[in-house]
Amino acid sequence: MTTLIIIVAAIFTNNILLASFLGMCSFLACSAKIETALGLGAAVIFVMTCTTAINYGIYYGVLVENAPLLKTDLTYLQFIIFIAVIAAFVQFVEMFVERFSPALYHALGIFLPLITVNCAILGASLFMIIRRYSLAQSVGFGFGGGVGWALAITLMAGLRQKMGYSHIPKPFQGVAIIMIITGVMAMAFMGFAGMVSIQ
Amino acid sequence: MDSIAAFFTENSAAIRDSIITFGGILVGLSIVLIVAEKLLINYGICEIDINAQEKVLEVDGGQTLLSALYENKVFIPAACGGQGSCGHCKITVLEGGGPVLPTETPHLGRKEVRAGVRLACQVKVRENILIRVPEELLNVKLFTSTVAGTRSLTYDIKEISFSLIEPAEISHRPGQYVQIQAPSSDGPVFRAYSISSPTYEKNSVELNVRLVPNGIGSTYLHNLEEGDEAIFTGPYGEFRLNEDPSVEIICVGGGCGMAPMKNIIYSIYDQWPDRSCWLFFGCRTTKDVFYLDELNQLSRKHPNFHVVYALSDPLPPGETWDGETGFIHLSADKYLEEGVRRQAFLCGPPPMIEAATRVLKEKGIAPDDIFYDKF
């Protein structure tokens, strides 16, 4: 039950992009077309779900004090190891996408490897430690966080495609209007706040 | 010093564990990636079938079609060196190329996409592939040569001639070009240059090269000295001279657009001494004029050959010029009469070509009989 709540919360009330403003770089850069946004969103969902699971295993299996594999407290290594795991995993996803969907691979271009430094991915792994989630909860949070991020970028891509037909005042053109819309979207998502809540 | 040593002895277990853990995890991740690479990137041996079994190549999968063909001595023109920016390496993929990639769409028209035209530098060989390559490209060879001589034609244009070593002979049509291999910081690149030596000179290739500031190819070529080795592929190009001697030939060129013109003119008069031919050559100032004496000499020998040079900039005081002035298309408009069967070859900067094409069409030349090369 709590896992389900965490998933829903990660998508709506605690959306990693709109509530924590993590993962903005690729959000701004890859939200021009719905297709690309969906592709990147799917990649983020996949990477986030899997890396939270792997990182959970490494953190509680090796790094914490009196862990089953190693007694020493190595939690200070969490940042560098989480990043290494994410980097390796993104490499794996890259090979996978190139093999099975070359068109998507070329559409995502540089942003696929850039998921490595997408702070939302590392953020999900760190939140799971701070909030002391169980394995199921962590994976749920990773999955929900990914879906939330994908939802936000897809909504933004839809808005930007519509925006092509509107007259934007010159000072607001480009990234400026996207930041403003992101802010408005974040406020709109606050309307979900009463639904469920986590920390 | 002591305190540092003491720190290490006290924490030796923690340091050891950190190193083992960190190292272990990195090694583990690397192994996973290597295995994944073996499974995902390895496509095994793939077959490339050219022109329905005319030539079947077996290549390692995973590389681009362009490099796979290059390895097997099928030289597709690619001026940008396979970055997908020049769009020269178009070939028809009938089967097994995967979907058209976003990097290719800017270079392909709707008709071409429907016909299966792709950029060879972007298509990766992942399975058996069926392609169609123009017969001519299969005849393209890789030449090694040495520089036989260089000569400055103007302040920025050099004439460079190469004598062929292997293969020792080249057979090309007038107006075709070769691709010179020039070294760059990102490995060798290819740059296209028209052959300026006539087709009957089979053992050498001569080029006219304008020095482009910071240009990779032209800087390399301008720095070549006699005896240096050079590698190029060729011949390429769609210029096709009409073999009917009653058809008049019109050449319009500017700058190093002289190269194909010189080739065409000398080749024509070797074969048809009485054929009618006009050369219109546009320059800015007298400093840009070259080959004028040689060509005037040729026109004295062949009365049906007419040379017109025009200067577009006003003449500075103290210089004399007895040729035409103004843009070159105006001279063409002035000299050419309507209603003659003609074929035209244009080579020069885009505005010149557009203006000249307009004039030539007014004179009644069919668009199919106008060949041009913009640069």
Image (spheres, rainbow, N blue to C red):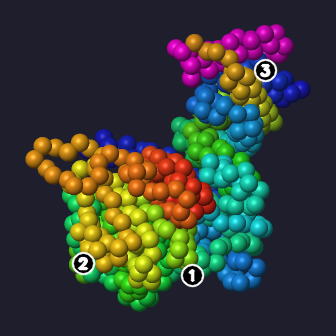
**Does label 1 lie on the same chain as label 2?**
yes
- Cα separation, mark 2 vs mark 1, equals 27 Å
Q: Residues within 10 Å of mark 3 (few under 14, many from 20)?
A: many
Q: Kindly identify the residue that appears in the image at 62 percent across and 20 percent down.
A: A178
Q: Which residue is drawn at the image coordinates 45% and 81% (left, top)?
A: B272
Q: Which mark is residue A12?
A: 3
Q: Earlier in the sequence, mark 2 or mark 1?
A: 1
C-alpha span from label 3 to label 2: 75 Å
Comparing B287 with A125, the one in front is B287
* B14 to B70, vertically: above or below: above
**Where residue B364 sits in the image (x, y, percent)?**
57, 55
The quadrant the C terminus of chain B occupies is bottom left
Q: Which mark is residue B139?
A: 1
Q: Disc number at residue B149?
A: 2
x, y percentage for residue A124? 67, 32
User: Which one is nearer the viewer's eye here, A29 or B298?
Assistant: B298
Report the residue at 89% width, 26% height from top. A1
Q: Are marks 3 and 2 on the same chain?
A: no
Residue extending farthest left: B318
Q: Is residue A174 magenta?
A: yes
User: Please, what is the three-letter code of the amino acid marked with disc 2?
Assistant: Gly
Discs 3/2, front: 2
Q: Callout 1: few (<14), some (14-19), or many (20+) C-alpha neighbours within 10 Å?
A: some
| Residues tagged 3 and 1 counted as in contact (Cβ below 8 A) | no
